[in-house]
Image (cartoon, helix red, strand yellow):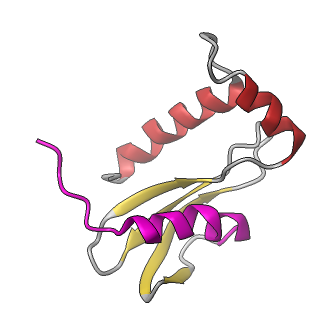
Amino acid sequence: MTAKVKTPDTDLIELSGKWVYKKPLKKERLNVNGTIYKVKEAECNKSSGLDYMIVENTTTSEISMVFEGMQGTQDFLTDGTLPGSIPNTQLREADAAYKKESQKYTIK
């Protein structure tokens, strides 16, 4: 049975649509719709364009992994390969990042 997520979708949308682009630092606190999120990890400026952060909802203790969306020409090229069967560098890095971070955190 899947655990029920308590973090609202509106918070996740703001985290992925605004805060991840601000490149917050580890241990920084983000006020998202009145809820405080603590940045547990932050990976930025990777050569593949894969940027993400791990945040903790300080009210529910839930951990979320938030990826940065499309940015620039390289991401258009990357996104164009998504329907294909050969994983590109960014997808491989996202998979590796999730596996690495899920060893430390229970990501919802």
> Which range is magenta?
1-24
Q: Residue furthest bottom?
A: 34
Residue 53 located left or right of residue 6 = right
What residue lies at 52% left-to-right and 32% top-to-bottom?
Answer: 95
* Foreground of the two, 89 or 17: 17
Q: Does 28 sit above or below residue 61? A: below
When asked about the image quadrant of residue 91, the answer is top right
Q: Magenta stretch: residue 27 in it?
A: no
Q: Residue furthest right?
A: 73
* Foreground of the two, 47 or 68: 68
What residue lies at 68% left-to-right and 32% top-to-bottom?
Answer: 90
Q: How many marks?
A: 0
Q: Does 42 sit above or below residue 97? A: below
What residue lies at 35% left-to-right and 54% top-to-bottom?
Answer: 105
Instruction: Give the percent coordinates (x, y) of residue 10.
Output: 45, 70
* Foreground of the two, 86 or 82: 82
Q: Magenta stretch: residue 2 in it?
A: yes
Residue 36 located left or right of residue 97 = left
Instruction: Give the percent coordinates (x, y) of residue 19.
Output: 63, 71
Q: Residue furthest top?
A: 85
Q: Does 105 sit above or below residue 14? A: above
Classify the position of the N terminus by image quarter: top left
What residue lies at 36% left-to-right and 61% top-to-bottom?
Answer: 63
Q: Does 59 sit above or below residue 69? A: below
When asked about the image quadrant of residue 62, the answer is bottom left
Residue 57 located left or right of residue 43 = left
Instruction: Give the percent coordinates (x, y) of residue 69.
Output: 67, 50
